[in-house]
Image (spheres, coloured by chain):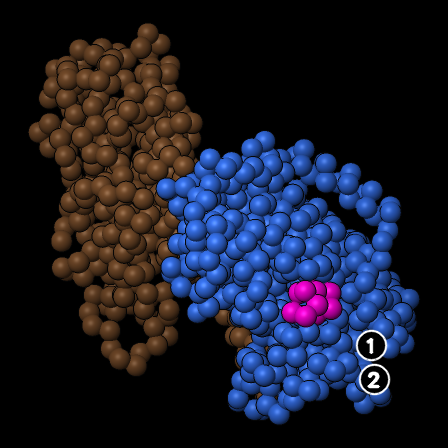
């Protein structure tokens, strides 16, 4: 195992070329990996239906997505219901519903990424409609052009409240937004100075929120000359955004962040390796769809340093399980469980978003993850429609080893996992115990299927995407 | 290995001996002779909701004005549990009297805040936000727990998680029973599945990368913690007798969490019912008895665990009540009252004078100690959190600890 944290030996020329599928370069594990990273996972049926699609074509269709008029109508209706309830859990549940049922799941996945990137918390904003409005903004631009998203979010009412922009006035500057647009949203630490922040704060003056809409009031705007990142002029908010987008650091910052989120959490790629992506991203006016399509179809994405090199966030964890177990589950309860696992949607801990990675896993959150899996695989209550028993009855898997392999394959794509025999042995003991009671063969199999799923979910590998 | 906890905590801890983690924590957290508090100390807040009648809780019996203003509700001097020549505790507070004798109880008198409101909701809001900054949306313990690492707090109760604990991440962990800290695996099957889970995470995968190892280690520590919780809920029932009241049950959950080496440093629970506008005497007696007995039992449990030196208990209410009793043998909303502190390393006894019964503010006791001073002292001296950053303001401290 190479200790160096760089993509050792990866050639920038070929790293981002599309993977060419051959029996040795393309397999079930890589297919599942793509679905996991891009679409929160996949059911066995979905894996089967996409297994004969060439990866480049599949990635393109994942990025493109489909439209579904009935789905949109359902969402519109649910949105009004959620907003009428006036509680955060309903908004969270609405979003989880969309992640589960959207015909364009990558868009939801990207929206989640941007929510973490532009982390805004309802706990301070205190307005459900505004939080939902921001969520729709992020969704609209999720696979669009980053520049447009940055312009719009600079004027987004929830953001204006969150970073105190609505108190930023000529003569009484509030630097909060200026600092974060440089440090967290656009450039990253080290690519601006404190002086730039002070000047940018002046350019952002004059905005507030009125009747749920952004409002610009010229009398509160500092119209004087500002020098920001070497550019001088009577800049306003839109100009600062434009200047940020012109910086070479902008593309590099975003590409690196998307790499860390979608390719690998354990690798720190060199600048030269990312440069082809950065260049392509920039000349296409920060086209996120192009970037995602290139990244998700590449050799690097399917390399050993990428596969299973990401800790599933709570949302990915529950949705992945729900897809694998092939049934919907109550979004309200799932939202609550995600919160208990440390990811309360619409309530990131700070403007830096969620720390992610290994930080998702501690003894407390791991307990909730296991409780969740037990609840989902129980065969009743939340697990009623995701019952593992349903997955085996149609297939006629027999024997303890067969059952262990089935779930190791379904959930980890590793039917020959080192833990297989231990799991099979436990299933055997369970079988003898259950058969002592008055139970039909199919209900015994059902019980064992549930146990098998619970045990596979307890493997450390299952925490990784 | 059987361990006499008092031996280990009383004497020096020998190197190389494997102490259970919470004992190491307790030893590290034990306030040293010259400084209270530490990095692993715990604060348990018991909120008395409704406006506790402080004047009948700690009675200035030597002042004739007391009986003049409370001909019916005034408690008989002979019934009181004497604190000193001027003050006596309500007879139902025997548990507190015992703690007082052991120098484990402090009574901070005359606590309130300027321009006090007599509205339950508004006043409780002031106590929970605890800052002069009126735009602040989070609670003082929410701001504190953000600084103490991780989520850092547990609320024992139902769906009414208090504003005090609220911060950008929302509410902290809410626990109603210890079952929530356990895997829902019971009976013979549960035993077998647990054994299998232990095996599946016991060894690292050769060639496994760092994230895999983090996942494995988190699973392992989860299973260990889960065992501790199960053992804790079995042990604590036998270790000390708990009264059968709602508050006692909630404090018992906290004691069990501490016994199971729960990492949080802030725990919060409440007892409702103190809004005694009429027929105060029997209700107040019952409530105070519940408070004192539950806290005394909690203290005993902490001792049996060897954790009594790292835990501080604080009680408060959103306001006191009027000096003059009303026409329904009750009292109406007032202002200043007292806060109780229970733990080790305290100065013990009354802190500050009892407010005058004649020099009143519109019929209410005047405060001399801003409650945020008490908070600031506890934040800095006990929890080692930055008081000014948490309270968004600076308040002169109170001498709470015997350092």
Q: Nearer the viewer, residue A407 or B207?
A: B207
Q: Position of residue A452 (x, y in %)?
A: 74, 70
Q: Nearer the viewer, residue B55 or B392?
A: B392
Majority secondary structure of magenta residues:
helix
Q: Residue at x 50, y 70 (%)?
A: B221
Instruction: Tell me which segment is drawn in magenta.
Output: A282-291
* Picture layout, residue B169 above or below residue A13: above
Figure quadrant of residue A158: top right
**Chain letter for the part of the structure drawn in brown:** B
Say if residue A338 shows up in the picture. no
- Disc 2/disc 1 C-alpha distance (Å): 7 Å
Question: Which residue position is annotated with label 1?
Answer: A55
Say if residue A190 shows up in the picture. yes
Q: Residue at x 56, y 91 (%)?
A: A2
Q: Colour of chain A?
A: blue
Q: Is A39 a magenta residue?
A: no
């Amino acid at each position: 195992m190479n200790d160096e944290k760089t993509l050792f030996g990866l050639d920038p020329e070929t790293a981002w070329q599309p993977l060419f599928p051959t029996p040795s370069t393309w397999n079930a594990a890589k297919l599942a990996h793509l679905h996991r990273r891009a679409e929160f996972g996949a059911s066995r049926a979905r894996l089967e239906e996409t297994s004969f699609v060439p990866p480049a074509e599949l990635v393109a269709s994942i990025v493109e997505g489909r439209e579904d008029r009935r789905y949109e109508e359902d969402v519109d209706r649910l949105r009004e219901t959620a907003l009428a309830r006036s509680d955060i859990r309903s908004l969270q549940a609405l979003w989880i519903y969309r992640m589960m049922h959207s015909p364009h799941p990558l868009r939801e996945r990207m929206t989640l990424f941007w929510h973490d990137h532009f982390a805004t918390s309802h706990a301070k904003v205190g307005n459900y409609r505004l939080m939902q409005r921001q969520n729709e903004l992020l969704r609209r631009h999720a696979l669009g052009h980053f520049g447009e998203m940055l312009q719009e979010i600079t004027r987004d009412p929830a953001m204006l409240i969150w970073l105190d922009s609505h108190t930023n006035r000529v003569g009484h500057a509030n630097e909060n937004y200026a600092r974060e647009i440089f440090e967290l949203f656009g450039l990253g630490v080290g690519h601006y100075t404190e002086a730039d922040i002070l000047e940018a704060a002046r350019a952002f003056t004059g905005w507030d929120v009125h009747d749920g809409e952004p409002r610009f009031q010229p009398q509160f705007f500092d119209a004087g000359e500002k020098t920001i990142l070497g550019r001088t002029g009577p800049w306003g908010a839109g100009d600062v955004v434009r200047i940020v987008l012109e910086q070479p650091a902008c593309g590099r910052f975003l590409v690196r962040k998307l790499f860390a989120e979608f390719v690998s959490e354990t690798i720190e790629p060199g600048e030269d390796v990312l440069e082809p992506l950065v260049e392509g991203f920039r000349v296409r006016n920060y086209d996120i769809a192009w970037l995602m399509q290139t990244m998700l179809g590449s050799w690097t994405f399917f390399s050993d340093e990428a596969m299973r090199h990401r800790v599933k966030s709570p949302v990915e964890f529950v949705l992945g399980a729900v897809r694998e177990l092939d049934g919907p589950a109550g979004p309200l309860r799932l939202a609550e469980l995600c919160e208990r696992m440390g990811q309360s949607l619409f309530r990131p801990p700070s403007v830096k978003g969620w720390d992610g990675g290994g930080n998702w896993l501690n003894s407390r959150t791991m307990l909730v993850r296991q409780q969740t899996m037990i609840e989902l695989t129980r065969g009743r209550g939340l697990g009623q429609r995701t019952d593992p028993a349903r997955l085996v009855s149609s297939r006629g898997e027999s024997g303890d080893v067969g059952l262990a392999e089935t779930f190791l394959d379904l959930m980890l794509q590793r039917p020959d996992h080192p833990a297989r025999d231990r799991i099979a042995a436990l299933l055997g003991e369970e079988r003898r115990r259950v058969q002592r009671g008055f139970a039909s063969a199919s209900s015994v199999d059902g019980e064992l299927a549930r146990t098998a799923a619970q045990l596979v979910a307890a493997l450390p590998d299952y925490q990784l995407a | 290995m059987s361990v006499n906890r008092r031996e280990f905590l009383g004497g020096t801890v020998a190197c190389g001996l494997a102490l259970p983690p919470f004992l190491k924590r307790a030893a590290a957290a034990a306030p040293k002779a010259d400084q209270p508090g530490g990095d692993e100390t715990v604060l348990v807040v018991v909120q008395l909701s409704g406006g506790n009648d402080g004047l009948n809780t700690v009675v200035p019996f030597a002042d004739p004005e007391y009986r003049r203003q409370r001909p019916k509700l005034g408690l008989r001097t002979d019934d009181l549990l004497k604190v000193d020549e001027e003050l006596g505790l309500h007879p139902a507070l025997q548990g507190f009297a015992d703690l007082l004798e052991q120098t484990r109880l402090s009574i901070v008198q005359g606590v309130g805040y300027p321009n006090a409101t007599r509205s339950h909701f508004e006043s409780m809001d002031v106590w929970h936000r605890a800052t002069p900054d009126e735009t602040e949306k989070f609670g003082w313990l929410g701001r504190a727990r953000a600084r103490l690492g991780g989520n850092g707090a547990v609320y024992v109760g139902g769906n009414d998680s208090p504003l005090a604990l609220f911060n950008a991440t929302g509410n902290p962990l809410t626990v109603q029973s210890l079952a929530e800290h356990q895997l829902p695996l019971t009976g013979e099957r549960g035993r077998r599945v647990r054994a299998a889970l232990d095996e599946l995470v016991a060894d690292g995968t050769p060639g496994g990368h760092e994230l895999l190892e983090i996942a494995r280690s988190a699973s392992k520590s989860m299973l260990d913690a889960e065992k501790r919780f199960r053992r804790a809920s079995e042990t604590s029932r036998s270790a000390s007798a708990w009264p059968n009241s709602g508050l006692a049950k909630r404090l018992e959950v906290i004691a069990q969490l501490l016994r199971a080496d729960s990492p949080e440093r802030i725990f919060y629970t409440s007892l409702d019912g103190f809004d005694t506008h009429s027929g105060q005497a029997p209700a107040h007696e019952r409530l105070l008895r519940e408070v004192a007995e539950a806290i005394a039992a909690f203290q005993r449990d902490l001792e049996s665990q060897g954790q009594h030196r790292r835990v501080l208990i604080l009680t408060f209410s959103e306001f006191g009540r009027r000096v003059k009793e009303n026409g329904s043998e009750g009292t109406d909303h007032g202002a200043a009252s007292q806060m109780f502190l229970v733990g080790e390393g305290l100065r013990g006894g009354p802190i500050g004078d009892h407010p005058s019964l004649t020099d009143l503010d519109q019929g209410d006791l005047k405060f001399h100690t801003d409650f945020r001073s008490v908070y600031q002292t506890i934040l800095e001296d006990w929890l080692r959190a930055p008081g000014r950053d948490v309270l968004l303001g600076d308040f002169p401290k109170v001498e709470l600890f015997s350092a």
